[in-house]
Image (spheres, rainbow, N blue to C red):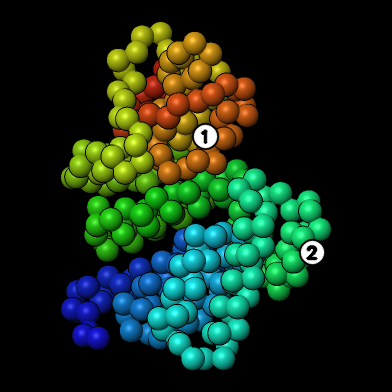
């Protein structure tokens, strides 16, 4: 494998440092662990890469994340074929997959066949996979979005590192608007925002919407708590029948949509909005509430 170019290597090293700092705060975050693993591979640090992959293995089993388990099995098969430790880890991962298959899509482990293997398979996983709700869940979703944009070459290595840095810094402060990847890019005067929004729209099959096109939507916006909209990237702007139309800043965050549906008791349909558009609408709602 050829050495990365000097500038590129320095950016990768900075990314690795940033990812390590994030893991000090969120040690169980799957996407950060995967990003650190792949960065270590690019830096040609095989021991660090394997150590990180093993951590990702433990957390993915604990979180019962099938997609990540598939990724880890593929990586084990490619980097250390024949190793007894790796083969043992692959066997445990495949046991977990089999259990999850028995559970089915709804996670029903009530039958004796599914419940007993589940207890054994997850016993050595440890942790909770960083799957807690609230702010931590939002941070994980934004980390995942940043990683996805980097993998899709919508962000450069330097831009990705800057986003991670800002997410970490801003999440520790009380903000009047959500802490999101799109807000960070907007504040950093990201020059390819329109292209990036179009990419998100096409990849996630979520239409782009301009909230200012809708009149008198401040009252509709009050169907969610103001604090919720100030902390999470979801804001109602219209309704069709009993259903709500929802402006979102992260179309990948399916858990947020589920939370909104629970809060308002209605079916919600997401539309991607620009961060400045979101902030303007949120300010209108704050004024209407006041």
Residue placed furthest toward the bottom: 83
Q: Position of residue 43 (x, y in %)?
A: 32, 80
Q: Which quarter of the image is occupied by the N terminus?
A: bottom left
Q: Residue at x 41, y 84 (%)?
A: 79
Circle 2: is it few (<14), some (14-19), or many (20+) Cα within 10 Å? few
Query: Vertically, is 59 above or below 186?
Result: below
Helix, strand or loop at mark 2: helix
Q: Residue at x 55, y 85 (%)?
A: 87
Residue 176 can be seen in this image? no
Q: Which residue is mark 2?
A: 116
Nearest the eye: 272 or 16: 272
Q: Is residue 163 left or right of residue 262?
A: left
Residue 133: which numbered mark, if any?
Answer: none
Task: Name the front one of labels 1 and 2.
Answer: 2
Q: Residue at x 26, y 75 (%)?
A: 10
Q: Which residue is mark 1?
A: 257
Query: Vertically, is 8 above or below 235?
Result: below
Q: Quadrant of residue 75?
A: bottom left
Nearest the eye: 110 or 45: 110
Q: Residue at x 42, y 29 (%)?
A: 270
Q: Is residue 97 left or right of residue 110?
A: left
Residue 206 can be seen in this image? yes
Q: Quadrant of residue 61?
A: bottom right
Q: Position of residue 41 (x, y in %)?
A: 36, 78
Query: Vertically, is 222 above or below 38?
Result: above
Query: Vertically, is 18 above or below 268?
Result: below
């Amino acid at each position: 494998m050829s050495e990365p170019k000097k500038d590129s290597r320095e950016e990768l090293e900075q990314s690795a440092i940033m990812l390590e700092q994030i893991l000090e705060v969120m040690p169980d975050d799957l996407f950060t662990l995967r990003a650190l693993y792949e960065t270590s591979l690019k830096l040609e640090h095989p021991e660090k890469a394997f150590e990180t992959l093993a951590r990702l293995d433990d957390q993915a089993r604990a979180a019962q994340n099938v997609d990540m388990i598939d990724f880890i099995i593929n990586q084990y098969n490619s980097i250390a074929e024949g190793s007894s430790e790796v083969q043992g880890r692959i066997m445990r991962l495949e046991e977990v997959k089999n259990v999850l298959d028995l559970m089915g899509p709804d996670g029903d482990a009530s039958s004796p066949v599914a419940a007993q293997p589940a207890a054994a398979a997850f016993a050595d996983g440890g942790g909770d996979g960083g799957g807690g709700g609230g702010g931590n869940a939002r941070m994980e979703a934004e980390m995942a979005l940043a990683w996805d944009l980097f993998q899709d070459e919508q962000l450069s290595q330097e831009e990705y590192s800057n986003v991670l840095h800002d997410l970490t810094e801003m999440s520790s402060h009380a903000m009047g608007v959500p802490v999101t990847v799109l807000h960070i890019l907007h504040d950093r005067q990201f020059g390819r925002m329109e292209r990036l929004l179009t990419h998100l729209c096409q990849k996630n099959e979520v239409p782009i919407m301009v909230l200012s096109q809708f009149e008198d939507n401040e009252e509709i916006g009050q169907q969610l708590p103001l604090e919720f909209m100030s902390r999470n990237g979801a804001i109602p702007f219209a309704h069709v029948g009993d259903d709500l139309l929802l402006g979102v800043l992260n179309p990948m965050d399916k858990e947020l949509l589920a939370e909104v549906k629970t809060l308002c008791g209605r079916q919600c349909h997401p539309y991607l909005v620009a961060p400045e558009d979101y902030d303007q609408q949120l300010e209108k709602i704050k004024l209407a509430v006041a």
